[in-house]
Image (cartoon, rainbow, N blue to C red):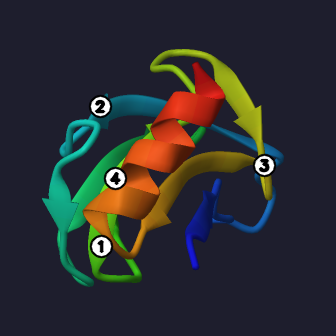
Amino acid sequence: MAYEIIMPALGMNQDTGIIVSWHKQLQESVRAGDTLFEVETDKATLEVEAGHDGILAWVTQKIGKPIPLGDVIAIIAITREEAAEIFARAQ
């Protein structure tokens, strides 16, 4: 079972966020609590932690463009095999 990572709401009047950097690379192991990416809002740039252990299987959103809240921005797989399957399907 894979986990979808969505663009979080980090402020009251926020409609979008902009990813300014990814701290993990595709196919890299992640642990819950690891910094996964940094997101910029109209007020601040904040680090966002992974909520699950696994493998960063796919990144659906690029750095530097506004992304609506709730949009899927990445997928964390449980196993390396699942991550490889997700990566292959997304290509």
The Cα atoms of the two marked residues, 3 and 1, are separated by: 20 Å
Q: Could you tell me the amino acid type at mark 2?
A: Ser
Q: Which of marks 1 and 2 is in front?
A: 1
Dot 4 falls on a residue whose secondary structure is strand
Q: Is residue 28 left or right of residue 46?
A: left
Q: Nearer the viewer, mark 3 or mark 4?
A: 4
According to the image, label 2 marks what residue? 21
Residue 59: image location, x then y, percent? 49, 36
Q: Quadrant of the N terminus?
A: bottom right
Identify the mark nearer the N-term, 3 or 1: 1
Q: Could you tell me the amino acid type at mark 1?
A: Gly
Q: Could you tell me the amino acid type at mark 4?
A: Leu
According to the image, label 4 marks what residue? 56
Residue 9: image location, x then y, percent? 68, 65
Q: Residue at x 32, y 71 (%)?
A: 79
Q: Quadrant of the C terminus?
A: top right
Residue 4: image location, x then y, percent? 63, 64
Discs 3, 1 touching: Cβ within 8 Å: no
Discs 4, 1 touching: Cβ within 8 Å: yes
